Image: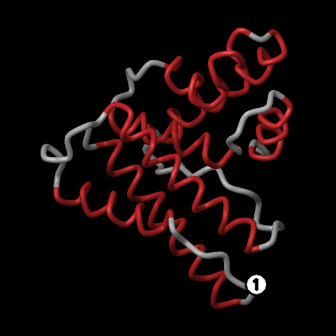
Amino acid sequence: MEIYEPLNQSLKHVGSLMDAAETHGILCGLLCVSQSASENIWIKHVLGETAIEDGLAFKCQQQLQLVKNYTIEQLESPNYEFMPLLPDDEISLLERTQALGGWCEGFLFGFSLTKNELDDLSDNTKDFIDDIISVSHIAPTEDNEENEENYMQVVEYIKVGVISCYDSK
């Protein structure tokens, strides 16, 4: 199911400063801390306070709600179906790498919105957060087979890490 590009276009349409990857990262960070985190916190940070009251943002809000529901379904799936929301493989590796860095920045932001203390986290979660910090600084790379493989491995690591983080909250 194609989610990334329609959500990205909708976010641009309402003037959001975030793309779909960063938006999804924030959601995942929030969900990894608390599933009961207020949806309004997420939407407020994605769309801004004025956009929430703007009638043009209604469609975008509906899409965001669908993305949230879909993400929770993925995270709770016994088949480990969760995937970070990133551009399709047909998009250049450069753009996908930039989106991955943005997703990680969003995750860290969302995680920090409701989690102020890292002391009560498991060592595995702390290590994962450190790794997400490193990936958030990822530099775009040229398209080649080795870089493509490295990208896929990092995405798979993030997928597993988010599922583990979500399950351990």
Instruction: Please name the amino acid that badge 1 sits on.
Output: Asp
Circle 1 crowding by C-alpha within 10 Å: few under 14, some 14–19, many from 20: few
- Quadrant of the rendered structure where residue 3 is? top right
- 58 on left or right of 168: right
- 6 on left or right of 63: right
Residue at 42 percent across and 69 percent down: it is 134
Residues 50 and 167: in front is 50
Q: Position of residue 113 (x, y in %)?
A: 39, 33
**How many marks are shown on the rendered structure?**
1
Q: Position of residue 169 (x, y in %)?
A: 26, 38
Residue at 64 percent across and 85 percent down: it is 147
Q: Position of residue 35 (x, y in %)?
A: 39, 27
Residues 160 and 5: in front is 5
Q: Position of residue 95 (x, y in %)?
A: 75, 66
Residue at 80 percent across and 72 percent down: it is 92
Residue at 43 percent across and 41 percent down: it is 29
- 71 on left or right of 48: left
Work out whether 102 lies above or below 54: below
- Residue carrying label 1: 143
- 36 on left or right of 80: left
